[in-house]
């Protein structure tokens, strides 16, 4: 018998004057213990479908169905959501939120048991009834230890080993990965037979995504739980699911095994989805065999004078020993970062969230004041905007922000927003401005009439185009792209990346491309740096780094990329992850990565590894110091 | 629903304002002319609200009072709105010392009883509308400033403000073109609630004996005056009280309509995003 | 948190000092002397003024006042010979405080219940009903309510006493009169807060967890929605506790508000000053308390005050 059976489910939204069909006559079934993937672009009605199943839609939604059966009712299902921060109550402690769920489900069980009990002995007097009512309250006090233990157990199942540290904290104090584990633990506290995971890893870093998915798979197996996994990312679906459903404009258009969908997509929209997934992963192909500590071709440090960053005087932007302490004064936001970008070059910077990428970007643009170090633009030193960077210098380095919903002022029309840089850079004629704006809008792929509209009338991708147009209207030499596509759909992502490439070719711009998505970096950049805990741990040509990562962190990062080819995914699936626990990137004396590193040595915990420069590569790791290189060579000889 | 509330409020306010302008202008009676023969009359065709204990036509007096109350309420709201916007924006945007100074000044302005300085002001400037407005504004700006400060602090770190700074805009330009327009919605809502508060404050001042000099009387003062004869002639209190109530209800409806409208538009935006 | 508290208290004390200075010079600016009674001789008047130290330089008087204030001595009333200002305050404050705190409690409880009920109800009749009750409540001047209550309960029905402070019954009407306006504001703020919070994602998760509606409303949403109410209630409570002249004169209660208005009418400098300082201290103190409470309630500020320097 199926665990979940849905037939002809439709959901309509009543949005004032218009009615929107979000889900249109969908039928599906989930068998016990099965992992099903539901894939579709954002806006295809995936989330609405899952919420309709759980009965969580707002009151303006109109749900109709022929059949909606969940074995054992909604109590047997639980849900994990996309953005764990907004789904946890900001003003209650984690422990509270987890334990109330446990208690709630204990009570449910007790209720059921006691009801069965009454049927046995029906001759119950009022005294006994009163006792029975008070009992759970007393039991609640007695149960405290038991509940605590269960909470710790659940957290461990979800991958948090030191439960005591986490239970006493508020959601905002935790990292994204930890929060998602908490939400997972809360879902597991409901003892579900069906777990609906709605984009559970979209907001997370690649490494954490990999960990959580592995965790989820293991739990599903151990607890014999069915999982309905919803995602827009082909890689995620393929790495998890046994059966895939494709959703498009509120309908399920196709279903099959991952292999079928990947190799023989029937519908147009599926074809497009697979195509984009292939395009992305073709760029991000990893050659597995070379992930050991390869020492071949390394020239000893010091033998070569000129290193990667000091290529020539042609550098447009040079950053030297830039650092800034975190707002909480506990750790480095950015710690002694140096690199250079040549004219017309796209330099990539990869790293997980919280590693200081955004702080670095803001310092380069002048929005934040560096704590130490210098920024040079064509040889002249730049101050921050607050400390007197002049308008001409500001104009040269522009930025595209991450969140297209927050980076446009909702009060002004697009035309107004785009006119601002022109006005401030001395373009006084209104006519000329209009012409320039119209031309720019066409360049970024929008229509000239869009200038009269307000930002809320545009989709995320279109807004990002507007933001790019605004940056370009200042006619900069350097564009800092801070996660410019990570808030967008896969399809939109590749369109925006194409736009970047085209603009670069036409205008000869230099890019600093910052992303946590390695595939995007690989696609865009010839040279890249990998950031971890405020430092650039590895820097070199993108191709070299992909083919032969040196730093252990880079290796971990590359392994966490999810391939979209189902065959590879199957092979990749059960690779165990050694270092799952996330340690805080606090103020350590030694290498910040030491806690996760498989090659950790004694010296790693004592001092920070200095950056060693080799031709075409820089790396901050003791493995590549003279002492250990000697060992490595010796090993190679054996 | 919200839109209806807002429109009802606007229409009501417009009607009241028109009456407050037209009635005193076209009334055959004067608000100050006493007539010993016509004391405490009940409402009739010639005196719609009757007359007070000095024989003055209450209908004329009520609308004159409404005019004064509206002047005081709207005038002080305009001034306090401007002051609060300026101080709040500076405090919220620049932070640090400016913030501390403005906020502590607001605390002190809140803590000094208004009666104390209004007494002095009436002695120095005379007991007229301008003095009342000035007196209300001395402490009235603090609430608006706190609100604008909060909004500005929330928006200050948002990406569109950073983007604006990257176009080369100065701090003042950022405040004026980017922060204040976004804070405006909340500001207008808070001002619609400020107007009734200002009218009430003026009423309190006239109870305490430092209000606008007789024979002119605001609505609040009329109600207070009518209270003396509540048991004999309840109309003398209830008519002005009713008009005052209508006035405040109109403003509250506008405020509530705007407030709710804000929430609704946010909701529909969220809707677009998730679906 | 500790450093934030310390800073906030320090600035609070500073505000109080500014307040005392401002009040001192403002009262001295007032024309007329408290001793201008009838047609007393100028020489006699000067004699009395010397007695009270009013002939000395203003700055000296100011410093003298400050040093006395530090010792808790607010001086002696000019108009009521031999009565210390502190005595006046201690006689009037308990009455005012009793009425004020009851009004605060009443408005918080009733207002919250109304606001929450309005926010969670699905019936349009309830929503609109509460909506119009709250608008009407806040649109009518409190002394109109007061006068109507006196007329209805005291004169027509004769069920409640309308003057004095003899027993608990006599507190009912003043408390009711004072509480109406803040109750309506609290209800509005609560409704808006709930309306905003109920759309948040964490409510969806709470529902997905299988929690009951009462639990979600009472624990999850309330804690997030009550901040604006607290922010309003702090200063409002200060004004309720320092007494309302209007309510006190309608119900003939010997409270602080009436004392203050009378002292201004009498030009009783020391009493004006003393009352101003006392009431100002209550206002500043409650503002401070509200700030600290809000900081404590929102975990972002409670844990480490991060982002404050950003």
Image (tube, coloured by chain):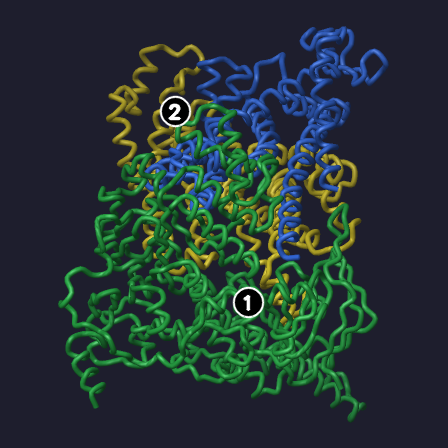
Chain colours: A green, B blue, C yellow
Q: Is residue B26 left or right of residue A269?
A: right
The residue singled out by tag 2 in the image is C27
Q: Quick one: SS at disc 1? A: helix
Q: Nearer the viewer, mark 2 or mark 1?
A: 1
The one nearer the camera, B155 or C117, is B155
Q: Is residue C85 in view?
A: no
- SS for dot 2: helix
| Quadrant where the C terminus of chain A is found in the figure | bottom left
Question: x%, y% of residue C104?
Answer: 57, 47
**Viewer-nearest residue: B42 or A594:** A594
Identify the residue at image location x=49%, y=69%.
Answer: A281
Relative side of A637 to C145, left or right: left
Which residue is tagged 1?
A277
Mark pair 2, 1: CA separation: 79 Å
The answer to whether the residue labelled 2 contacts the one labelled 1, judged by CB atoms less than 8 Å apart, is no
Q: Residue C25 is drawn in which quadrant?
A: top left
Vertical placement of A362 versus A265: above or below? above
Residue depicted at 78% across the width and 50% down the height: C124
Name the spot of residue B183 as percent of width and height, x first. 52, 38
Instruction: State the count of labels.
Output: 2
Q: Position of residue C24 (x, y in %)?
A: 35, 28
Q: Is residue C175 above or below residue B142?
A: below
Q: In the visual, does C210 lie left or right of A517?
A: right
Identify the chain of the residue marked 1, using the numbered disc in the image: A
Q: Is residue B69 placed above or below B97 in the rendered structure?
A: above
Chain containing mark 2: C
């Amino acid at each position: 018998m199926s665990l979940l059976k849905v037939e002809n489910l439709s959901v309509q939204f009543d949005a004032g004057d218009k009615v929107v069909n979000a889900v249109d006559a969908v039928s599906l079934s989930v068998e016990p213990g099965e992992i099903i993937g539901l894939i579709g672009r954002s806006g295809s009605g995936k989330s609405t479908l899952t919420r309709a199943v759980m009965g969580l839609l707002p009151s303006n939604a109109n749900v109709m169905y022929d059949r909606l059966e969940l074995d054992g009712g909604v109590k047997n299902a639980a849900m994990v959501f996309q953005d764990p921060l907004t789904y946890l109550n900001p003003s209650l402690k984690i422990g509270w939120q987890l334990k109330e769920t446990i208690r709630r489900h204990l009570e449910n069980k007790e209720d059921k048991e006691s009801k069965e009990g009454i049927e046995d002995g029906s001759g119950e007097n009022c005294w006994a009834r009163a006792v029975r009512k008070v009992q759970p309250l007393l039991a609640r006090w007695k149960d405290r230890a038991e509940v605590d233990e269960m909470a710790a157990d659940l957290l461990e199942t979800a991958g948090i080993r030191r439960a005591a540290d986490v239970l006493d904290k508020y959601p905002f104090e935790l990292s994204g990965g930890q929060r998602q584990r908490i939400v997972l633990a809360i879902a597991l506290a409901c003892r579900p037979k069906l777990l609906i995971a709605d984009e559970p890893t979209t907001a997370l870093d690649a490494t954490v995504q990999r960990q959580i998915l592995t965790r989820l798979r293991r739990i599903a197996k151990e607890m014999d739980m069915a999982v309905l996994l919803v995602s827009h990312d082909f890689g995620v679906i393929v790495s998890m699911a046994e059966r895939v459903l494709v959703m498009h404009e509120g309908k399920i258009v196709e279903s099959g095994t991952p292999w079928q969908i990947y190799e023989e997509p029937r519908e147009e929209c599926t074809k497009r989805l697979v195509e984009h997934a292939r395009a992305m992963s073709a760029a991000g192909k990893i050659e597995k065999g070379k992930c050991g500590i390869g020492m071949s071709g390394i020239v000893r440090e010091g033998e070569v004078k000129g290193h990667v960053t000091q290529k020539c005087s042609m550098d447009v932007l040079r950053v030297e020993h830039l650092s800034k302490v975190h707002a909480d004064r506990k750790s480095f936001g950015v710690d002694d970062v140096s690199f250079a970008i040549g004219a017309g070059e796209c330099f990539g910077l990869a790293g997980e969230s919280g590693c200081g990428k955004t702080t670095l970007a803001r310092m380069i643009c002048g929005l934040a004041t560096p704590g130490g170090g210098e920024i040079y633009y064509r040889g002249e030193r730049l101050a921050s905007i607050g400390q007197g960077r002049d308008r001409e210098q500001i104009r040269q380095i522009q930025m595209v922000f991450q969140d297209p919903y927050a980076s446009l002022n909702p009060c002004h029309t697009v035309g107004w927003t785009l006119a601002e840089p022109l006005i401030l850079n001395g373009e006084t004629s209104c006519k000329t401005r209009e012409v320039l704006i119209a031309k720019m809008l066409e360049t970024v792929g929008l229509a000239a009439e869009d200038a009269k509209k307000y930002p809320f009338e545009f989709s995320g991708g279109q807004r990002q185009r507007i933001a790019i147009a605004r940056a370009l209207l200042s006619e900069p030499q350097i564009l800092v792209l801070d996660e410019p596509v990570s808030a967008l759909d896969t399809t939109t992502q590749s369109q925006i990346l194409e736009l970047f490439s085209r603009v670069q070719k036409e205008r000869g711009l230099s890019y600093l491309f910052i992303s946590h998505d390695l595939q995007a970096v690989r696609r865009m950049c010839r040279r890249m740096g990998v950031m971890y805990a405020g430092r650039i741990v590895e820097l070199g040509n993108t191709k070299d780094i992909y083919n032969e990562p040196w730093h252990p962190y880079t290796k971990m990062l590359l392994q966490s990329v999810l391939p979209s080819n189902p065959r590879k995914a199957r092979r990749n699936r059960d690779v165990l992850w050694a270092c799952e626990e996330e340690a805080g990137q606090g103020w350590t004396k030694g290498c910040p990565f030491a806690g996760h590193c498989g090659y950790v040595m004694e010296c790693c915990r004592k001092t920070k590894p200095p950056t060693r420069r080799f031709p075409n590569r820089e790396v901050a790791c003791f493995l590549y110091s003279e002492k250990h290189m000697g060992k490595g060579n010796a090993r190679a000889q054996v | 629903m919200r839109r209806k509330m807002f429109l009802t409020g606007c229409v009501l306010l417009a009607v009241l304002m028109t009456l407050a302008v037209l009635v005193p202008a076209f009334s055959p009676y004067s608000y100050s002319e006493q007539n010993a023969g016509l004391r405490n009359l009940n409402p009739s065709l010639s005196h719609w609200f009757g007359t007070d204990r000095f024989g003055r036509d209450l209908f004329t007096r009520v609308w004159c009072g409404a005019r004064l109350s509206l002047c005081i309420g709207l005038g002080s709201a305009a001034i306090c709105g401007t002051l609060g916007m300026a101080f709040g924006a500076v405090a919220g945007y620049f932070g640090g010392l400016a913030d501390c100074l403005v906020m502590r000044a607001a605390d002190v302005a809140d803590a000094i009883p208004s009666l104390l300085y209004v007494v002095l002001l009436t002695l120095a400037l005379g007991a007229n509308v301008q003095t009342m407005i000035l007196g209300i504004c001395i402490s009235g700006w603090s609430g608006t400033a706190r609100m604008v400060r909060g909004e500005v602090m929330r928006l200050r770190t948002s990406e569109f403000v950073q983007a604006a700074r990257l176009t080369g805009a100065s701090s003042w330009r950022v405040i004026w073109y980017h922060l204040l327009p976004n804070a405006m919605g909340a500001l207008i809502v808070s001002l619609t609630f400020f107007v009734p508060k200002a009218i009430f404050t003026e009423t309190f001042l006239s109870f305490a004996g430092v209000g606008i000099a007789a024979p002119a009387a605001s609505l609040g003062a009329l109600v207070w005056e009518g209270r003396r004869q509540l048991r004999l002639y309840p109309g003398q209190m209830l008519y002005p009280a009713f008009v005052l109530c209508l006035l405040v209800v109109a403003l509250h409806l506008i405020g509530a309509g705007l407030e709710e409208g804000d929430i609704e538009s946010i909701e529909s935006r969220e809707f677009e995003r998730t679906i | 948190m500790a450093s934030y508290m310390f800073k906030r208290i320090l600035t609070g004390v500073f505000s109080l000092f500014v307040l005392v200075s401002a009040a001192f010079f403002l009262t001295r600016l007032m024309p007329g002397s408290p001793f201008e009674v009838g047609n007393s001789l100028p020489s006699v008047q000067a004699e009395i003024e010397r007695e009270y130290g009013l002939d000395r330089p203003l700055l000296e008087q100011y410093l003298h006042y400050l040093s006395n204030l530090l010792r808790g001595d607010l001086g002696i009333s000019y108009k009521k010979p031999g009565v210390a200002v502190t005595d006046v305050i201690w006689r009037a404050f308990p009455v005012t405080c009793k009425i004020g705190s009851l009004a605060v409690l009443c408005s918080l409880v009733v207002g919250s219940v109304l606001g929450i009920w309005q926010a969670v109800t699905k019936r349009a009749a309830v929503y609109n009903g509460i909506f119009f009750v709250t608008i009407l409540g806040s649109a009518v001047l409190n002394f109109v309510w007061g006068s109507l209550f006196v007329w209805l309960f005291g004169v027509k029905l004769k069920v409640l006493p309308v003057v004095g402070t003899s027993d608990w019954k006599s507190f009912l009407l003043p408390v009711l009169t004072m509480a109406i306006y803040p109750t309506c504001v609290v209800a509005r703020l609560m409704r808006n807060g709930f309306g905003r919070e109920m759309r948040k994602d964490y409510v969806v998760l709470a529902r997905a967890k299988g929690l009951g509606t009462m639990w979600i409303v009472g624990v999850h949403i309330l804690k997030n929605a009550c901040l604006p109410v607290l922010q309003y209630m702090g200063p409002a409570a200060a004004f309720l506790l320092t007494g309302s002249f209007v309510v006190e004169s309608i119900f003939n209660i010997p409270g602080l508000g009436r004392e203050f208005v009378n002292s201004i009418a009498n030009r009783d400098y020391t009493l004006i000053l003393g009352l101003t300082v006392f009431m100002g201290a209550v206002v500043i103190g409650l503002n401070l308390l509200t700030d600290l409470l809000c900081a404590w309630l929102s975990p972002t500020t409670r844990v480490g005050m991060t982002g404050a320097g950003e």
